Image (cartoon, coloured by chain):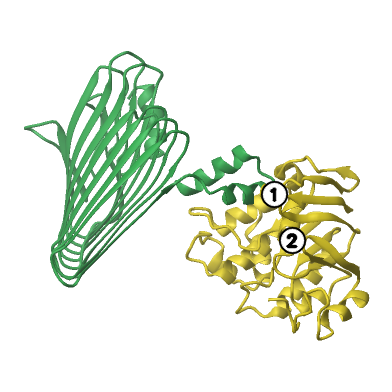
Amino acid sequence: MLELKNISLTVEDGAELLNDVSFTVDDGKLVVITGPNGGGKSTLAKVIAGIIQPSSGQILFDGVDITNKSITERAKMGVSFAFQQPVRFKGLTVRELLHLAAGEQLTDEQASTYLCEVGLCASEYIDREVNGSLSGGEIKRIEIAMIMARRTRLSIFDEPEAGIDLWSFNNLIDVFHKLRRELKGSLMIISHQERILDVADRIIVLADGKVAAQGSKNHVLPELLGGKCKFCCGQECVNDHE
Amino acid sequence: MNEITKSLLAMIADLKGEPDGAYNIREDSGCAGRQSTANVDIVPKKDKPGIDIIVKPGTKGEKIYIPACVTHSGVNDLVYNDFIIGEDADVTIIAGCGVHSEGEEDAVHNGIHSFSVAKNARVRYVEKHVGTGKGTGKRLINPQTYIVLDEGSYLEMDTMQIKGVDSTKRITKAAVAAGAKVVVKEKLMTHGEQYAETAFTVDLNGEGSGADLVSRSVARDHSRQLFRSCINGNVACTGHSECDAIIMDQGVVSAIPELTANHVDAALIHEAAIGKIAGEQLIKLMTLGLTPEEAEAKIIEGFLK
């Protein structure tokens, strides 16, 4: 359903942030992109969402070339993107953002369900402004709830575990399982977390802007977790690549 | 009341026809309707244009409508409204002003309001301003509000100016006694060549008194705004003022705070943030399927809500 063909991105100072990246994400699959910091993971997610335009290459979404389509067009076609650092809005409430995400007026019950899924008490949060009064963990969970409300063909999460401190990690994993079950779509998760890697159908390792390895979890995971991580410049690799 | 007044009233006070309860509808310097109730007396002044609004002590939950409309150019309206709120009362006053101009001459409303709020009374004062009509004459609204809060009382002023007012100069002064609090929430949008000036002055005179002055505004096109807030903490008290502005196109916003702590236990804060809409906010809403224009409108709608 998503196919990247030879995506490269060179910025003004000549640095190559992405170099000939090609892979596919099949229907209904959960793909985790991992690799060292600065390897190009977030950049790649932004390229897929249309926030950054690649220098060359092609992106196909359900067989349609979306390389030159705008962020809005891609969103309407079914691409969702949960930011690593969610945006705050003075004046817009959780309820309003969930309505916008769903593309329709949700009932209180529907909106509450999404908030409960991410471990937030709906009555406490639904009318709160998504402003600086929310903690990093709270706003991150609201970001995930918005993606759930979008129910799109492709949901991209950029480091969803970051900042989720007080919420049990199991719940986050449950959210991904639920999305897989209920959505007729695919998930792409950028993560360093072993437990997220562990639920992947396919793992893609991005280092220095290139695909350093890709394959099934069983194929790639032992390489990543074998004490010395060959994708991380030979550094000791425990649970993540921080 | 004429059709333009009816249309303005719907915008500024959500009114269709005459309201229940106490009201006074001012139209082109005259009276288009007035009603007192058992607890709220509305009495025309004898020495100058305007009314006294007298709320009996202990009055609870009543809404009082005091809107003013200028429906054609060439009107320069001046009105003095004095609100006398009795002890322990708790009322909402819906004021608001609409000015309409179809001609070359200006349509002007100058409203001078005073509030005397007795011990432990609470007042919510809601004021919406709007300008309409296609005349070249300017639509001007210049309100002045003088507030005296007695011990333990509370006054919240929600003001909003959304469109069509070419120039406004708003002066608000408050003297706050012990345990009393004044809260002002201002929402302002200017466009075209409009000018808006806000000047708050609050004297926190009583032990434990408080002030919270918050302005959110958007300046578009070539419009200009000036926000001044002056809080004098004369005793142990808390004062906060905040100016939060979005500028677009060639809009200009100035924020000038002045905090004076005349007492070692006066805690005073000012915050100001002026800037364009953050690009990441637009991008986030676009990833939800909104066009850039829809995203911008949504952000502003939320900001000024």
Q: Which chain is disc 2 placed on?
A: A
Image location (x, y in percent) of residue A181: 85, 67
Q: Quadrant of residue A209?
A: bottom right
Q: Colour of chain A?
A: yellow
Q: Which chain is disc 1 placed on?
A: A
Please tell me whether mark 2 or mark 1 is closer to you in this view.
Answer: 1
Q: Which residue is farthest left?
A: B47
Residue A26 is left or right of residue A88, and the answer is: right
Residue at (89, 48) in percent of width and height: A62
Q: Which residue is mark 2?
A: A40
Can residue B305 be seen by looking at this rendering? no
State the SS at label 1: loop
Type of amino acid under label 1: Val
Can residue B199 be seen by looking at this rendering? yes
Image location (x, y in percent) of residue A229: 81, 79
Residue at (59, 51) in percent of width and height: B280
Type of amino acid under label 2: Gly
Q: Is residue B219 above or below residue B27?
A: below
Using the image, tell me which numbered label, if any, was put on residue A170: none
Q: Nearer the viewer, residue A99 or B261?
A: B261
Crowding at mark 1 (Cα within 10 Å: few <14, some 14-19, many 20+):
few
Residue A23 is left or right of residue B104, and the answer is: right
| Mark before the other along the chain sequence, 2 or 1 | 1
Q: Which residue is mark 1?
A: A11
Image location (x, y in percent) of residue A24: 90, 57
Residue B53 is left or right of residue A238, and the answer is: left
State the SS at label 2: loop
Q: Colour of chain B?
A: green
